[in-house]
Image: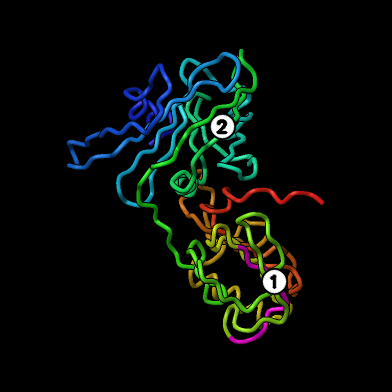
Amino acid sequence: MSIKYFAAFVIAPWLASTAQAEWQKSEIKDEMRGKSTSVFSLTSSPISGSGPDVTLMVLDKNDGQPGVVFSVKDGRTEGCPTADSSYCNVNVKFDDGKVLAENFSTAEGTHLVPSEVVAFAGTITKARNLFLEVDLKQYGLLQYKFSVKGLDIFIDRSPKVKVLGFELGEAYPNLDIPLTKSKVNGMDVCYAGENIEGVFGPGKAEKVHMCFYDNVFYSAIVTPGTKPTYVAGVKYLNSVFGKPDPDSIYPSWPNTGDKVIRRSTKRASYLTFEKNKYGLPFIISDEVISPLVPETPKP
């Protein structure tokens, strides 16, 4: 289904003229298939200045892979989509997390769908506030705030990815880890170690760096250091994600091919395109939790 048709089908009944303080819920019934989609919506006006309202909608079929759409009422984005494409980058921020240039798909600049749609929906379920900064024709750059707390929907968090026995995306309030605390920034706590055994199986990894936000494991950086540990890492990631994207400049998981909309909530990569290089890291991250993590203050 095209973005334009999708938007026209689900959005028209949900545009509101006033901001909503809480999630509004209703159902779209598919009489032909005997199924229904829950629609959760919030509408926001510009934080400062005048401009059109923007409605945030989360569409949930209870299959763990909800859709997310931002709809601009009586307005259109400037420079989005970019020339000869159907997507662009738009700044978003969750709670006190970093400002992120999120990739969005759009057919004509009136409806924006985040490319990492399931992870984006997952972050909404964990956040209190979502900020959107979008450039609109005739208005310029406008900011919107959505109070997203309280959205209770199922998010598919598969596959299970583990490092040193810790599962990505899971909470560990009573942490016992064979690493040394290396950074504390509020609820963001990281640990590091060298020559660590059992990261991807037998053998040692040269360096390991693991981070937890509010006790939830969200990031690992593992430098293999040797070919056997590198091979073990690739085999492990292949076993949980499938084979990496063959068209990527460096090995990355999962293989999303040329899909504009991606539905995984976890990702991994090995940051080199050269062979026989084992001193660079595997980077493994949870894309639901990572956007919530505040930026580390500069010294």
Residue at 43% over, 33% down: 3
Q: Is residue 50 above or below residue 26?
A: above
- Queried whether the magenta region covers residue 160, the answer comes back as no
Please tell me which of labels 2 and 1 falls first in the chain: 2
Answer with the quarter of the image where residue 151 lies: top left
Q: Is residue 245 visible?
A: no
Tell me the SS state at disc 2. strand
Residue 37 spot, x, y in % from top left: 28, 39
Q: Is residue 229 left or right of residue 148?
A: right
Residue 22 spot, x, y in % from top left: 38, 32
The residue beneath circle 1 is 192
Dominant secondary structure, magenta: strand
Which residue type does callout 1 highlight?
Ala
Q: Is residue 258 left or right of residue 22?
A: right
Q: Is residue 101 visible?
A: yes
Of 101 and 185, which appears nearest the observer? 185
Marks 2/1: CA–CA distance: 34 Å
Range shown magenta: 202-211
Q: How is the image coloured?
A: rainbow
The residue beneath circle 2 is 132
Which residue type does callout 2 highlight?
Leu
How packed mark 2 is, by other alpha carbons closer than 10 Å (few <14, some 14-19, many 20 or more), is many
- Queried whether the magenta region covers residue 204, the answer comes back as yes
Residue at 70% over, 80% down: 227
Residue 264 spot, x, y in % from top left: 48, 55
Residue at 72% over, 74% down: 207
